Each structure stands twice: as C-alpha cells, then as structure tokens.
Image: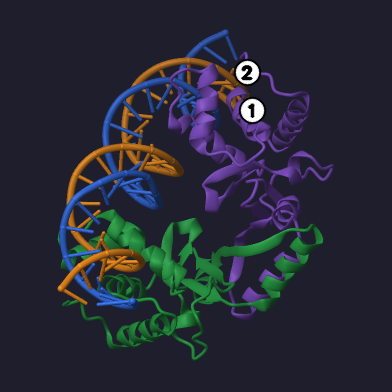
Chain colours: A purple, B green, C orange, D blue
DNA sequence: CCAAATATGTTACATTATAACGTGTCTTGA
DNA sequence: TCAAGACACGTTATAATGTAACATATTTGG
C-alpha cells in the first residue's frame, strides 16, 4: 500500500497499464506500478539502479532483484522497453499513451537516442520492420524479436549545434 | 612477439586487417592482432572475459583493461562489431573477408542472432538502412550510428525445429 | 638521441545483473 | 472454508561486464 503518488499524467498512464494487464490476466501490483511510475516520470532512460534509489525512498533496503523482477514483468507486458546501448529503460509510448493500447505483446519498435540531450524517441515504423523482414527472409532467417536503436541528434539539438 | 598462431584462414584475415590499419595510419599491434584472432576463431560472439581467458594462455595475469582497450581499437577500426544484446563481439565479415575492404569507417550493419545455434550473421542491407534514414529524417533526427539486431532462427535451426 | 605520442601493465573499483532460497500473499477448487 | 499450489516479494550473496587512474614501456618523428 501507500505507493508513491505521481504526476497526474503519469497516474493516467499507470491506470492504462493496469487495465492492459487486467485484460490478459496479469497483475500490476503496487510495486510494479511504482517502478513503472518511476520510469515514466523520468525524462530520459533510467538505469535499474537509479530506479532502485527511487524505490528506496519508500522502501528502505530494497535490493536489486526487486527492481529487476519488476522490470522483467514490465518488459514482458510490453509496458517498457530496454535500450540496450544504454542498459536503461523507457516507458512504451505506443502502449501507454495512444488509443491503440493492445494486448501487451512485444511490438516492433525503434529508438532514436539523442546524444545531445539524452532523450529517446520511440518510433513504430513499418517500413523499417518490413525492410528487416524482407532482408532476413531472403536468407531464410525467421525474426522473433528485433532491436533497432539509432544514435544521433534530435532536431532541437542539431539546430542548437549549427547555430 | 610470439603471438599465438591461428588457423591459416584467420591469419589471412588478420593480414587483411593489418593492411587496412596501415592504410590509414593506425597500427594492428601484436596484442590487438591476437585479440582480433581470438574473436575471429570463435564460431560465435565472444565476451570480453572469454577473450581475456584466451589471452591469458599467452600472457598470464592479463587484466580487463588490456582486452577492453584492444576491443575499443578494433571497434573504431571497424574490424569487429559489438552485439549489444549479448555484450559480445564478432569479427566484421564485411571488412575482413570481402574484396570491398575500405577504410575502416563504421558502416551500417545488421546482425541476425540465431537463438538455436548461437551463430550471428552480419547483413549489410541498404533497404533497412534507408528505411531508418527516411523515417528519422521525417522527424528531423540525424542518425550518426545505428544498431540493428534481430533474434530468431536461422534456416538450419528452423528446419531442425519443424522436423 | 631525445621528446612526445602511443601502447600496454597494474591496481582498484564501478556498474549491471542474477542465483538461490526463504517468506508472505493471493486464489481456487474440493 | 481452508489447505495446497501458484505467485509475488524479501534477502543475501555473488557473477558478469566495464572503467578510472596512474605507472611503465615502446614507437615515432624531429
């Protein structure tokens, strides 16, 4: 009980997440909700140990497995994504914001990491996915999951750099 | 001196690598050559600490920074790639095998990771790259480097599974 | 040859992640 | 209802991956 209260927008997204979980028989417990909230409130990808620090505000002495288990759950539900290049986690804008909140199967997603401001943008571009599927089918490879991450400069940071 | 002798095919690729380095003023030292050799001889992606064990056959007491520095060099030269999802390294088939051995600038590459046999196949598909560039340009993002990794089953493992 | 740059050795530590086992809580069906 | 199993969480310890910082050696260019 007594889970941290987040900003209203975050609470809305958490409620969405809770509905999504309920819809296919899994439970967004207080702990998981809190970890997801911490991820969503961060403007940038968050590392597991940053989340642990955040948790400890509530639960002194929390240990790594607590966070990693919550993250594993959230990943499986498709509520967050892991940015491999950063060993850090972001909320899934696709499932939590849009109206297209589907069953939490892992969907193809691409991440744009701005090396200027550190923000990560999630794309859901079918062209990229199809190009990948096409190329792999030609050599008989069957894709189950794909990781697409691009590093570069977002529009704002590029403009700031050329100014 | 007295760097390990690898299989003939590996030595050929190491010689290619050495030429590539010389061509733009960097040096493939004995140590770097040995680490690259260890990567190339492995049938699968190799972790840094596996490489360290391999190194220690020659140089007892070698420490992590030795391996990581060699890896950093090889990555910069484009002679190897890091598979982020595996925290492991593979030789770059593009620069080391083909005749298209260019200056070792990082080129766009995609990796297919077979969860059956653990082998990784490197693609160099322009369709994927262009799809990514197109999608990002639309939102004003400038890509400097991209990571594309797909997990799934290679043709052989898929056939074995359906049999 | 000498100085600067480059490469490597060495020690210590930071960061990320998981194994293993115990305890609590939920739920479900006899 | 309540016991049994499943599920979630707590706790301790440790594994795996990666770097900082500084000392030494090697190479290269003037």
Q: Are marks 1 and 2 on the same chain?
A: yes
Number of numbered discs overlaid on the protein picture: 2
In the image, residue A102 above or below residue B49: above
Residue drawn at x 67%, y 77% is: B126
Evaluate whether residue B16 shows in this view.
yes
- Which residue occupies the foreground of this view, A146 or A142? A146
Q: Residue D30: percent from the left, percent from the top?
A: 33, 76
Please state if B78 lies on the left or on the right of A15 as rendered: left
Q: Residue B47: percent from the left, percent from the top?
A: 36, 60
Quadrant, the N terminus of chain A: top right
Q: Secondary structure at mark 1?
A: helix
Q: Name the residue that disc number 2 marks.
A: A3
Q: Residue furthest right?
A: A99
In the image, residue D11 above or below residue B103: above
Residue drawn at x 45%, y 33% is: A65
- In three-dimensional space, the C-alpha distance between marks 1 and 2, rounded to whole angstroms, equals 8 Å
Q: Residues within 10 Å of mark 1 (few under 14, many from 20)?
A: many
Please state if B34 lies on the left or on the right of A10 as rendered: left
Residue drawn at x 51%, y 84% is: B102
- Disc 1: host chain: A
Which of the labelled discs sits on residue A33, or is there none? 1
- Which residue occupies the foreground of this view, D6 or D24? D24
In the image, residue A70 above or below residue A145: above
* Mark toward the start of the polypeptide (1 vs 2): 2
């Amino acid at each position: 009980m007594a889970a941290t209260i987040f900003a209203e927008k975050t609470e809305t997204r958490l409620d969405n997440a809770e509905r999504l979980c309920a819809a296919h028989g899994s439970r967004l417990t207080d702990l998981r909700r809190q970890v997801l909230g911490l991820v969503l409130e961060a403007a940038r990808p968050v590392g597991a140990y940053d989340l642990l620090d955040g948790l400890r505000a509530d639960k002194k002495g929390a240990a790594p497995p607590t966070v990693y288990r919550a993250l594993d759950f959230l990943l499986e539900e498709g509520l967050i994504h892991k940015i491999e290049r950063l060993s850090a986690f972001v909320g899934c804008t696709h499932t939590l914001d849009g109206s297209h909140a589907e069953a939490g199967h892992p969907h193809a997603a691409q991440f744009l990491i701005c090396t200027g401001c550190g923000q990560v943008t999630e794309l859901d571009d079918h062209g990229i996915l199809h190009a990948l599927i096409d190329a792999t089918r030609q050599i008989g490879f069957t894709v189950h999951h794909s990781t697409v991450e691009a590093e570069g400069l977002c529009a704002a940071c590029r403009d700031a750099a050329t100014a």
